[in-house]
Amino acid sequence: MNRHNILYFFREGVKSIFSHGFMSLASVTVMITCLLLTGTVLLLVLSVNLTIESMVTLGDIRAYVDETYTREEAEALENKLRMIPNVSGVDFIPNDRALEEMRDEFGTDAWLLDGLEYDNPLRHSYRIMVVDIDEYDQTIDDIESVPGIAEVHSSRESVNRLSVIRNVLGTVSIALVLLLGAVAVVIISNTIKLATFDRREEIAIMKMIGATDGFIRFPFIVESVILSQVAALIAFGLQWLAYTYIVSIGLSSIELIEMVDFSTVRYYFLGGFMGIAFVFGVLGSIISIRKFLRV
Amino acid sequence: MIRINDVYQSYGPGTRALKGIDLRIDDGEFVFIVGPSGSGKSTLAKLITAELRPSEGRVVVNDFNTSKMKMSEVPYLRRTLGIVFQDFRLIERKTVYENVEFAMRIVGASPREIKRRVSYVLDLVGILHKARRKPTELSGGEQQRVAIARALVNNPNTIIADEPTGNLDPDRSLEIMMLLQHINDLGTTVIVVTHEKELVNQFDKRVVAIDGGLIISDRQGGYFQYEQT
């Protein structure tokens, strides 16, 4: 590609978009829809993931020490717990602190617990955080097998259920990217095919006067890149607005799922949308113009 | 230089357009390739422009062996040729100037070079005053002049014109032929494929006559006389 021609390619690409405006609009609309659907599923995956992560990293595992153990003996278990693979943090909660926490939970009814400090029935315990939730089950089994640990409470069931949902959504999102990507490729390629068909005579002339395939192809690639990038930017804006609105009106009140904050993932979404749209756009244009280059 | 050795061209089983052609055209020559419809003269032109690859034999055009070259080399062969068509093949949405400029853009010429050269060739073919017009606003003869300007603009070694006067009246045809002769006088090889007997006979040039896929006559300073041979 020659530097003198860059402006020419850009000008020709833009002209072509407006010369068949309806088809251009259709391809942008379809691409926006594809990106929005994919983005929505992806946001759900991220939210479920966040929910699971916050459950396990905030220490949903509580390991209770055998009640026959003294405080010193209970504290001595900390090292053994820390050595278990996948454990990221261990917080020892002596029974007097557990009682204090209970008082806090009881609030105005805390007087019901008066006197228990002299004969505390609560056990010493550990709050345990893990790294990888895929190793969650194994980690709990490891904790249970530590001598001195009498009982382990965890959200194993909920975490497992959410993991299944996350995996299903993950698979769905990959399938959606592929399926909607194919739709986007077809629509973009049809738009470019229309443009190339419109200019098939011109392409034949260009070939006869010595134009390389690259020179002929480039304005069409520019056209599809512009269309796909416009679609990506609009889809990104709509995704942001719609998601923020939906979270603000209701979903945030559902405590079961912790919704991901869009502002933390916006650059990934913008880059992802633009990247996916770029690949599908270029692919669509290359597929559609091939047959017209055989002169 | 163009060298065609023992070339056969088939369009399918039992359809042979050329049946063993040998032809050599040296740099600076002016050659008419003549023959009746279906004789194989356009096939020969297409072999020279690499629109077709020979089924058998060897075609070498300006050092490109079209029998063996890759598809990616075809544009570079065509840049050594200036091709003129019977139906002009101008891009209607572009002006005269843009049609010619476009051919230089393809080879990556600089804007300054384009400006200088396009004006020169438009002046050479006598159409500079209509540079801002669209092809549809021009007569057939004028459109063919633009096509010749486009063929010339990259300073090709050879101009190949396939029935360049097929859509023109006799006066305009003669003008176009005179223009091609003038271009030849400036040093460019010119090959004109035509079936217009009257026109050919007005010029004292080499005439290669084809009929039934064979060269039946090749005479320097000859006339269009394949009917008598």
Image: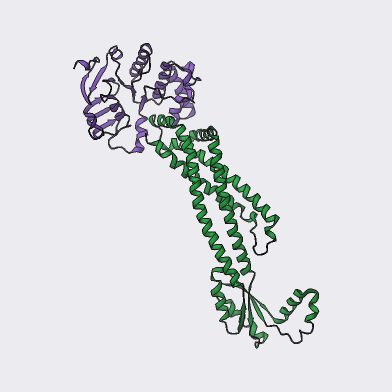
Chain colours: A green, B purple
Q: Quadrant of residue A64?
A: bottom right
Picture coordinates of residue A273, whole percent (x, y):
56, 49
Extreme-left residue of the structure: B229
Quadrant (top left, top right, bottom left, bottom right) of the C terminus of chain A: top left
Which residue is at the front of the view, B112 or A166? A166
Percent position of residue A1, x then y: 45, 37
Going 36% across and 22% down the picture, which residue do you hit? B86
From what the image shows, is residue B71 above or below residue A280?
above
Whether residue A85 is visible to the viewer of this picture, yes or no, is no
Q: Residue A232, position in %: x, y?
A: 57, 46
Q: How many marks?
A: 0
The relative height of residue B31 versus residue B74 in the rendered view (above or below) is: above
Q: Position of residue A16 (x, y in %)?
A: 52, 34
Q: Camera-side residue: A248 or B52?
A: A248
Q: Which residue is drawn at 75% across and 74% down?
A: A105
Q: Is residue B195 above or below residue B17?
A: above
Q: Quadrant of residue B192?
A: top left
Quadrant in which residue B85 is drawn: top left
Drawn side of residue B46 relative to residue A247, left or right = left
Left or right of B24? Residue A254 is right
User: In this view of the protein, can residue A291 be seen by the observer?
Assistant: yes
Q: Is residue A259 left or right of residue A276?
A: right
Q: Is residue A18 above or below residue A62?
A: above
User: In front: A44, or A220?
Assistant: A44
Front residue of A136 and A86: A136
